[in-house]
Amino acid sequence: MAQTDKEFFDNRLNLFMQDGWIDLVDELINLAEGIDSVMSIDNERDLFYIRGQLSILNMLLNMEEGTKLAMENSEESPSL
């Protein structure tokens, strides 16, 4: 793994251990649960707005797992 990749992954892992990140994830989960209902959607515009919100929430909530998977894949692949 290249040194810049290692630093990137180390910084991400450090971020995920911070109290602020843990609090943010808890808040994002609460937000996602609050808008994850189709009953509140009145029209197509609202549907696409909520869909965008959920997409961003999912990206942030899956960042830790995605980083760990990327790390594993980068450790398994040979360096060029």
Image: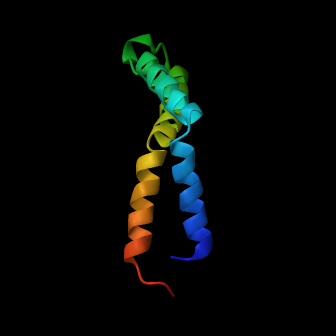
Q: Position of residue 51 (x, y in %)?
A: 48, 31
Q: Nearer the viewer, residue 21 or 40?
A: 21
Rendered view: 9 above or below 32: below
Name the residue: 43% across, 53% down.
66
Name the residue: 59% across, 61% down.
8
Instruction: Please identify the quarter of the rendering in which residue 75 is found.
Output: bottom left
Rendered view: 71 above or below 18: below
Rendered view: 36 above or below 9: above
Outermost residue, bottom side: 80
Count of numbered badges drawn on the protein: 0
Q: Position of residue 74 (x, y in %)?
A: 44, 71
Name the residue: 51% across, 23% down.
27
Q: Position of residue 69 (x, y in %)?
A: 39, 59
Instruction: Please identify the quarter of the rendering in which residue 6 is found.
Output: bottom right
Q: Is residue 46 left or right of residue 66?
A: right
Q: Nearer the viewer, residue 38 or 33?
A: 33
Name the residue: 37% across, 75% down.
76
Rendered view: 12 above or below 50: below
Colour mapping: rainbow
Q: Position of residue 10 (x, y in %)?
A: 55, 59
